[in-house]
Amino acid sequence: MSGHSKFANIKHKKEKADAAKGKIFTKIGREIAVAVKEGGPDPANNKKLSDVIAKAKSNNMPNDTIERSIKKAAGDSNSANYEQVTYEGYGPSGIAIIVESLTDNKNRTAANVRNAFTKGSGNVGTPGCVSYMFDKKGQIIIDKEEFEMDADELMMLVLDAGAEDFSEEEDCFEVYTDPDSFSEVRQALEEKNIPMASAEVTMIPQNYVALSDETDIKNLQKTLDLLEEDDDVQNVYHNWDE
């Protein structure tokens, strides 16, 4: 799984997120609300909530904002019920795209997602049409500039905690886990105060597809931008080799 570093992509995403902090915090707030409703407000007893909090922190969400989101979700029985809906489809040149959403209005979200695909000359497909091209994995990225431990020590730490794969890239370390082991590995790093640039369960493409046609690249970027701007959309995965 090594050899295809996503760190530059994560830094680029962070820069975009910094430019639209309110939007990214809104999306993470929805994830917190769903996690609290499913498993309660105590992260010590709610693995999903603990994972979302880690994601919030890696996106520089302030602790008091996280606490407020948890309290609001725990105390507001009339808050919106968000439903998780996943869409799959194709961008230009058959680029595989998976869209994960949390929505309180499935009709609105479906229309917006379909519009994003159509405007980029792609199309929404049937469930399962592209997800078989991805592996669901826990992925933790550690920025070398923020990290002082010896690489071998780090590798032993994460493998002992249950990681499946560890790789050293030019500017970061990448750790991959089975989704079920993700929380344990992340917590092992937290206990050692190791800063994580990114820590989440994600969809990793089995193969990446390069685009050379400028029109295809513009169309795909249009679809991805429209999806990222949509408040209902939580995550977008694709196999475009940027």
Image (cartoon, rainbow, N blue to C red):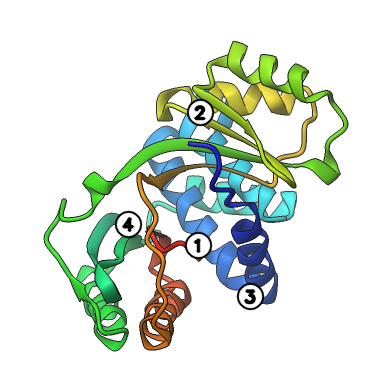
Residue 141 point in image, percent of width and height: 64, 41
Comes first in the chain, label 1 or label 3 = 3
Q: What residue is shown with label 3?
A: 20
Contact, mark 1 vs mark 3 (Cβ under 8 Å): no
Say which amino acid is labelled 1: Lys
Residue that appears at 68% across and 20% down: 155
Say which amino acid is labelled 2: Phe
Q: What residue is shown with label 1?
A: 27
Residue that appears at 66% across and 55% down: 59
Residue that appears at 57% across and 31% down: 43
Residue 81 found in image quarter: bottom left
Comes first in the chain, label 2 or label 3 = 3
Q: What residue is shown with label 4?
A: 81
* Dot 2: element: helix
* Dot 3: element: loop
Q: Nearer the viewer, mark 2 or mark 4?
A: 2
Residue 172 point in image, percent of width and height: 71, 43
**Left or right position of 129 against 90:** left
Observer able to see residue 242: yes
Q: Is residue 196 above or below residue 112?
A: above
Contact, mark 1 vs mark 2 (Cβ under 8 Å): no
Comes first in the chain, label 4 or label 1 = 1
* Dot 1: element: helix
Determine the CA span between mark 1 and mark 2. 21 Å
Comes first in the chain, label 4 or label 3 = 3
Q: What residue is shown with label 2?
A: 182
